[in-house]
């Protein structure tokens, strides 16, 4: 059985990776598909090409996982070739209402089934939008995203991270010369 894991992936998080890795052990193949809309392009932090590059780097070790993109309705994408089922992750009950509506709509307009995998509880508070928010202030997001996403976010906010690191370095006591200790001595 084939599965398609659709999303915005702006960028892919550790929660996505958890769902994807577990799905790759269940399905014959899983295609991670960035769904994009040319009219909404400006609303994303990463361009479509950047998101695809990050996804390829983050999923390269998963042999039966591929990466793709599509600009249009998900049911139209699913109707091409033999795409199988839609895979979505659920983090918390709050995701359920939205996902239920989309799953029902996709079955109604495209006769496509959706299967859900519950993300591990440690990722229940992690979302791409929160990760973007933390990174925009130079915060540490390395636990919450795969390395490729972390590197891309660091590059995107290079000036913010640099400023934060410089501030942290200048707040540290100078341990090379012991200048602080000797200055404090009478
Ligand atoms: O990562 P996201 O933003 O939760 O993913 C939502 C996504 C992209 C899967 C959904 O918005 C989608 O399928 N968009 C494609 C357009 C479409 O088919 N819309 C009808 C169902 S809402």
Image (spheres, grey):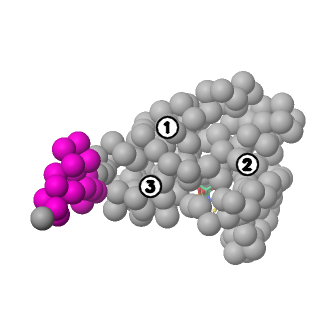
CB-based contact (under 8 Å), mark 3 and mark 1: no
Up-down relation of residue 1 to residue 181 (above or below): above
* Residue drawn at the location 49% of the way across and 64% of the way down: 130
Q: CA distance from mark 3 to mark 1?
A: 14 Å
Residue 184 colored in magenta in the image: yes
- Residue 50 visible within the image: yes
Q: Which residue is more in the foreground, 9 or 34?
A: 9
Residue 148's tag is 1
Earlier-in-chain disc, 3 versus 1: 3
Q: Which residue is mark 2?
A: 19
Residue 140's tag is 3
Q: CA distance from mark 3 to mark 2?
A: 22 Å
Earlier-in-chain disc, 2 versus 1: 2
- Residue 39 visible within the image: no
Q: Position of residue 74 (x, y in %)?
A: 65, 50
Asked if residue 166 lies left or right of residue 143, the reply is left
Asked if residue 33 lies left or right of residue 2, the reply is left
Q: Position of residue 99 (x, y in %)?
A: 72, 66
CB-based contact (under 8 Å), mark 2 and mark 1: no
* Residue drawn at the location 21% of the way across and 49% of the way down: 178
Up-down relation of residue 22 to residue 88 (above or below): above
Q: Residues within 10 Å of mark 2 (few under 14, many from 20)?
A: many
Of circles 3 and 1, which is in front? Answer: 3
The quadrant of the rendered image in which ligand 1 is seen is bottom right
Residue 110's tag is none
Earlier-in-chain disc, 3 versus 2: 2
Question: Tag 1, which secondary structure?
Answer: helix
From which residue to which does the magenta span run? Answer: 167-185
């Amino acid at each position: 059985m084939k599965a398609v894991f659709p999303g915005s992936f702006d960028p892919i998080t550790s929660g996505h990776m958890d769902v994807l890795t577990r799905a790759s052990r269940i399905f014959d193949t899983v295609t991670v598909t960035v769904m994009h809309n040319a009219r909404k392009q400006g609303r994303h932090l990463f361009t479509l090409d950047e998101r695809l590059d990050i996804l390829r780097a983050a999923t390269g070790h998963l042999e039966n996982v591929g990466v793709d993109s599509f600009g249009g309705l998900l049911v139209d994408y699913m109707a091409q070739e033999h795409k199988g089922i839609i895979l979505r992750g659920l983090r918390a009950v709050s995701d359920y209402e939205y996902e239920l509506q989309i799953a029902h709509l996709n079955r109604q307009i495209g006769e496509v089934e959706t299967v859900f995998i519950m993300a591990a509880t440690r990722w229940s508070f992690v979302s791409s939008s929160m990760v973007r928010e933390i990174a925009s202030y130079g915060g540490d997001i390395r636990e919450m995203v795969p390395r490729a996403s972390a590197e891309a976010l660091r590059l995107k906010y290079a000036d913010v991270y640099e400023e934060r690191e410089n501030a942290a370095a200048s707040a540290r006591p100078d341990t090379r010369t012991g200048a602080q200790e000797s200055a404090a001595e009478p």
